[in-house]
Amino acid sequence: MTRERLVAGVKAGVTSVHGLIAQGRGEAFDYLIGEQSHPFALTAVEAAAALLLRARHPVISVNGNVAALAPREIVRLATLVGGALEVNIFHSSKRREQAIRSALEEAGATRVLMPTKKAVLPGLDHNRRFIHPEGIAKADVVFVPLEDGDRCEALRAAGKEVITVDLNPLSRTARTATITIVDNLVRCLPLLSERVIALQQLGPASWAKSLSLYHHSRILKAAEEKIRAARS
Amino acid sequence: MTRERLVAGVKAGVTSVHGLIAQGRGEAFDYLIGEQSHPFALTAVEAAAALLLRARHPVISVNGNVAALAPREIVRLATLVGGALEVNIFHSSKRREQAIRSALEEAGATRVLMPTKKAVLPGLDHNRRFIHPEGIAKADVVFVPLEDGDRCEALRAAGKEVITVDLNPLSRTARTATITIVDNLVRCLPLLSERVIALQQLGPASWAKSLSLYHHSRILKAAEEKIRAARS
């Protein structure tokens, strides 16, 4: 089903060729962890929910694969945390950026920020440096699922907290982010929205505790161990 | 470079969307084994060279990814072992089959066998069941790099020896084949051609020895261990 969503994403001009290859890499790691949301992912989801709720200006960065795989879930999350949605893709294509925007709007988004030349994320070249002044430029917390290492590093260097979803715990993205959910995007997004709702009801006092349960290096180590223990 | 070859393959109509995802899965496993040709791969290459030389009627089955990634190397191998090249793809598309044939001819192939309705490989549905009476139907040894498990099983069930290239040692293809080269296709094909030339000079007496060095389950186990020991 996930694969068919991506194939539809290609047809709609949302997903890139490179996005498909990235999906395959993710599938391999998902296979190795048994296609399950493990405790290391659930702990990260809990902390991510708390960090998004605590943020003054959370932004959700959306690329082609995210828009193709989980448009409704990502729009729902943005609404729940009161965050902005901003389109950002690796390989420059105005047409694809517009296709992603349309996919998000069809999924219920009322406002989708686009890259502008008015603001720039230092340390990046090409298309990825352009951001929106009211979006990523102003964000204190950025949720960037399925991201590449350079961009993750540039966001951290700009002083932002970064939450990512990456099935490879050894990747630069996974290591660089503040919080890394080592899980399949389609599987973890509903869990994340669920935890946002629960923690919102519990109130701000609970958020610090949820955050304190997350230890970045230990979480990545646990995911790495799971991959090593992989069996057919 | 490998990725750019595939992107060009998409443009030429050779590679499918599913082929791109499969490439990504391969990349993930290649990353885990350190993007090197390990002893378990070299032993398999040695045995594969011997088996191809010993074959009465070797056939090389070519799909979209193989044609996009290594057209010259695969045509060279077919020439060296005196084997036929036969096009076979998972998702039915006459247009893509023709594009693959053209890619092989551009790479120097003088004869490319196409699927026909005159011969069938039992146990498969859709497009994959159709084979050429002078090709796979008659083959005693089939080299099917980057293959799926169903087809590999059907070829084995039809009494053929199967050599595959698969970066995932836990896959059904890897387990089902007679000889599995757990390596990147682009990296191992030149090594395979090199060993074919060397073993041809040494003569038939050497082939049995090269084959005796290969123990299927031990080779797969060694590759699996390497993946488990993966570090960043």
Image (cartoon, coloured by chain):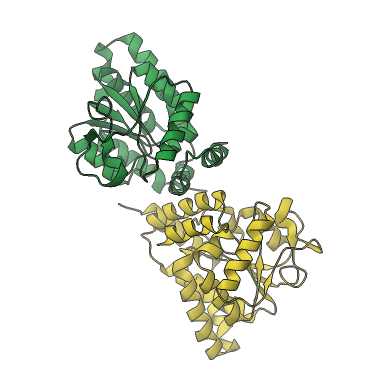
Chain colours: A yellow, B green
Residue at the spot 25% in from the left edge and 33% down from the top edge? B178
Observer-nearest of B78 and B135: B135
Observer-nearest of B171 and A104: A104
| Residue A226 sits above or below residue A162 on the image | above
Q: Quadrant of residue B164?
A: top left
Residue A229 lies, in percent from the top left, at: 36, 54
Residue B200 lies, in percent from the top left, at: 34, 12
Residue A232 lies, in percent from the top left, at: 30, 52
Q: Quadrant of the N terminus of chain A?
A: bottom left
Residue at the spot 37% in from the left edge and 35% down from the top edge? B145
| Residue B119 sits above or below residue A105 on the image | above
Q: Left of A139 or right of it: where is A5?
A: left
Residue at the spot 70% in from the left edge and 73% down from the top edge? A140
Q: Left of A67 or right of it: where is B29?
A: left
Q: Quadrant of residue B140?
A: top left
Residue B64 lies, in percent from the top left, at: 43, 38
Observer-nearest of B16 and B161: B16
Residue at the spot 47% in from the left edge and 20% down from the top edge? B108
Q: Please give the count of numbered marks on the rendered protein.
A: 0
Is residue B127 visible to the viewer in this orientation of the structure? yes
Is residue A213 visible to the viewer in this orientation of the structure? no
| Residue A129 sits above or below residue B208 on the image | below
Q: Left of A116 or right of it: where is B178?
A: left
